[in-house]
Image (cartoon, helix red, strand yellow):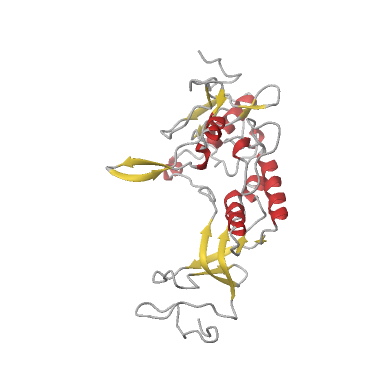
Amino acid sequence: MGRARPGAPTTAPWTALGRTAPLLRRPEVEYTETVIIGAGQQGCGVAASLQELGRESVVLERGEIGQAWGRERWDSPLVGSGNRSVRFPGWEYDGDDPDGFTPGRELARHLRRYAEERNLRIRQHTAVREVECPPYASDRDEVRCRTHLSDGGSIESRNLVVAVGGYAAPRVPALAADIDPAVTQMHSHHYRNSESLPDGAVLVVGAGISGQQIADELVDAWRGVFLSVGRHGAWPRHYRGRSLHEWMSVFSLDEEYVKVGTSGGGTAEVLPGLPVAAVKDGSGRSQPRHTRRDGSRSRRFRARGGRPDPAP
């Protein structure tokens, strides 16, 4: 990287093997200890945690803080994990409805206010073009990553956190190409409301939080709905009069979402499915309506016009 700090050994950090000196920062290139890509819940949470430890970081966001929740989802998403999960380092949910479900755009506002109050270093409208991480970098190196920005700038860092989530870009299965073009196809990333679809019955593929909420919204719009359910794990929303997240809070289980399971004979980390998604009942209050406390369904979707049939 050219010129090293005074008194430090000269090194060519991006050469391959055989080096003995550590990779050092260049004074003419911007440097921070940790670069975080993405200013959503995870990115802002990591930045705040590092701040509490006295470590420096900068967050790079291609859009705005809370971009996905505020601008890239449909008109009425709810945080399916419940208000108890809406918390960040140094900030717990302080509202009067811990078992309710925060609208996505409200969560984005919470996140922007949190970032401002914590004075987090966040660069909005700053897209990342690519990242270089030499495979031979070691723990003693100051520079282990180089982040290239779309505007031509670069930032060198010791650490890199990619906090863009698992759904940053729509993923469409290959079999979608074999469906008759007369059938309108739309990924949930582009769905906004029931009016954005042509008339007729709707097949919703996937029964995660997005799939369940969208299916419920379409039923409320008097659409006939098929809901295609996969094999993902899901927990009941309620147990013995308490919500799942209330139990997790009581036993401090909400600190750990990753469990260890066995797959293919080996040990692997498994992220279990979150509870079924929240929807709104007739009173306008956010409530889970897809499962009873014992885990059985409380709504049924049928491929015909009209309201859903009551579950048996």
Residue 311 on image: x %, y %: 52, 15
Residue 204 on image: x %, y %: 52, 33
Please report the residue visible at 40 percent of the width from the left and 69 percent of the height from the top: 135
Locate residue 231: give its quadrant. top left
- 112 left or right, relative to 60: right
Question: Between residues 45 and 231, which one lies in front from this camera angle?
Answer: 45
Give the farthest residue toward the top: 312
Please report the residue visible at 61 percent of the width from the left and 34 percent of the height from the top: 198
**Numbered circles on residues, count:** 0
- 251 left or right, relative to 284: left
Give the farthest residue toward the left: 265
- 264 left or right, relative to 142: left
Residue 269 on image: x %, y %: 39, 45
Please report the residue visible at 65 percent of the width from the left and 36 percent of the height from the top: 193
Q: Vertically, is 120 above or below 29? A: above
Question: Between residues 107 and 238, which one lies in front from this camera angle?
Answer: 238
Residue 22 on image: x %, y %: 44, 77
Question: Between residues 1 and 173, which one lies in front from this camera angle?
Answer: 1
Question: Between residues 96 and 111, which one lies in front from this camera angle?
Answer: 96
Please report the residue visible at 67 percent of the width from the left and 43 percent of the height from the top: 107
